[in-house]
Amino acid sequence: MSAYLRSAAHLDQLPSRELPVTGDSRECRFPSTRAQALPCNSERFSVQSVAEERQRMKYAIVLPDGAADEPVERLGWKTPLEAAKKPHIDWVARHGRQGTVVTVPPGFTPGSDVATLSLFGYDPRENYPGRAPLEAAAQGIPLEPRDTIFRCNFVTIAAGKMADFTAGHIPQEETKKRIGFLNEGLRTEGCRFHAGVSYRNLMVLSDFDPSNLRCTPPHDIPDRPVADHQPRGTGAERMRAIMAKAHEVLVQHGEATESAGATDIWLWGQGRVAALPSFQSRFGVRGAVIAAVDLIRGIARCAGMSVIDVPGATGYLDTDYAAKGRAACRALGSLDLIAVHIEAPDEAGHLGDAAEKVKALEMIDEYVVGPLLEALRGYGDWRILIAPDHPTPVGSRVHSATPPPFCMAGTKIPTTDNSEAFSERAARDGGVRVDPGHELMEMFLRSQNP
Ligand SMILES: [Zn+2]
């Protein structure tokens, strides 16, 4: 348990001793906005730096990917969020408000691309460029307007079924080697392959119109026959030919057998070059994002936000949670807003592993949310938002469009519900419903009384 929580265990009274409170009892649990409310007697602060700190509100956003779920039998019919010991996150829900947010507009495939765009305040119906273009932006791949970018997963297809959409979380050096073989072997097809992180790679095709092509994300068809989910529409034949040729290349080079290892590539998530209106111009805050996965880094780059690299952040269950938490706290010193994305709960959901999901949530609570709350407390005005992008239930192992829960707390965010903990149920039963979901960012950043 962090020092913050040890002190917060009584506070419900925490700021009343260390940070004077306003007269409004609904706000009394948060640091005041008045000048004298700051810890001016602290030797760490000069008068000037205190004044500077006070100029701007500090915002922290934690995005536990795919964290929302459904009741799980193995967890005594609790959801992983309900089963996890997450005292800091529960503190936020208890001292602020929670609700649900419609991150995936009707007609969109539930995924982190669409859902995270919503959470960052962009309406996917107006701003969605496709998943692969966002990832290409993250990787800084030089592109031209006539280019179409595809997500190119390394996958394992065995007995005609999608056995593993990650090809066993193929190691990076193996990825690079195989991308080299593909670039050699498919040069005549006009495609260019770019290595991303592990199984998440990209392919670029010039002079290809993607507007009538439909592809299926491989994580949506675990253990299902791939023949039923091949690309459809204009250009589908060409896609199938490229995937078949890639299979030959991978097997020829001895990098896979017919049924084990990275047997195939799977193309999906296509679109043209992406650009978003800048986050700072829209919301008036300078923000940065910490994320290991290219998709989230791409959304940040397209929105003009900085991306902070954290050594040890892997985008998987073994990520260095504490390093991410420390980097986020440091970033608050020079920025208005830091958003930390953690992929692990989503990966646990895809694995169907309830225990791993619970563990991921507990790690996020202890090593990311706890330190952030502690750091935020050093500033005058602050707010924190915790928002999974979508559910990845361990039962179905695929994303769902059910609106996920969120909670927020901080300066001038009143305590509006009586729940003790953050959960899907509490958010649904007692909370507000934000629809469309892109309005949540506006509410979090700007509202005087969200
Ligand atoms: Zn996922």
Image (spheres, grey):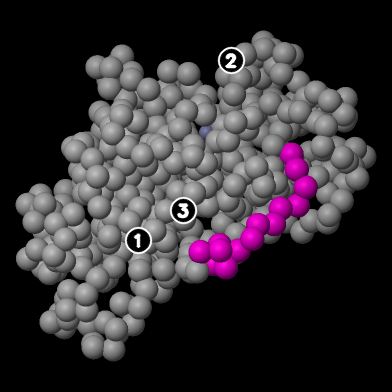
Considering the numbered disc 2 on the image, is that residue within a helix, a strand or a loop? loop
Marks 3/1: CA–CA distance: 13 Å
Is residue 280 magenta-colored? yes
Q: Is mark 1 within 8 Å of ligand 1?
A: no
**Residue flagged by tag 2: what amino acid is it?**
Asp
Residue 431 point in image, percent of width and height? 32, 37
* Residue shown at the point (16%, 66%) measured from the top left: 22
Q: Position of residue 331 (x, y in %)?
A: 40, 67
- Name the disc covering residue 448, or none: 1
- Left or right: 199, with 253 as reference point: left
Q: Mark 1: give few (<14), some (14-19) or many (20+) Cα within 10 Å.
A: few
Q: Which residue is mark 3?
A: 441
Q: CA distance from mark 2 to mark 1?
A: 49 Å
Amino acid under disc 1: Gln
Q: Foreground: 339 or 322?
A: 339
Image location of residue 154, percent across then percent down: 66, 32
Secondary element under disc 3, as helix, strand or loop, is helix
Residues 407 and 185: in front is 407
Residue at the spot of label 2? 223
Would you place residue 330 above or below residue 190 in this image? below
**Is 275 contained in the magenta span?**
yes
Is residue 169 shown left or right of residue 369?
A: right
- Residue range (magenta): 270-283
Q: Residue 210 lies in what quarter of the image?
A: top right
Q: What distance separates the C-alpha of mark 3 from that of mark 2?
A: 37 Å
Q: Residue 349 — which label?
A: none
**Which residue is depicted at the point 22% across and 75% down?**
34
The answer to whether mark 3 and mark 1 are in CB contact below 8 A is no
Q: Is residue 100 above or below residue 138?
A: above
Using the rendered view, name the quadrant where residue 391 is placed: top left
Choose between 218 and 449: the one closer to the eye. Answer: 449
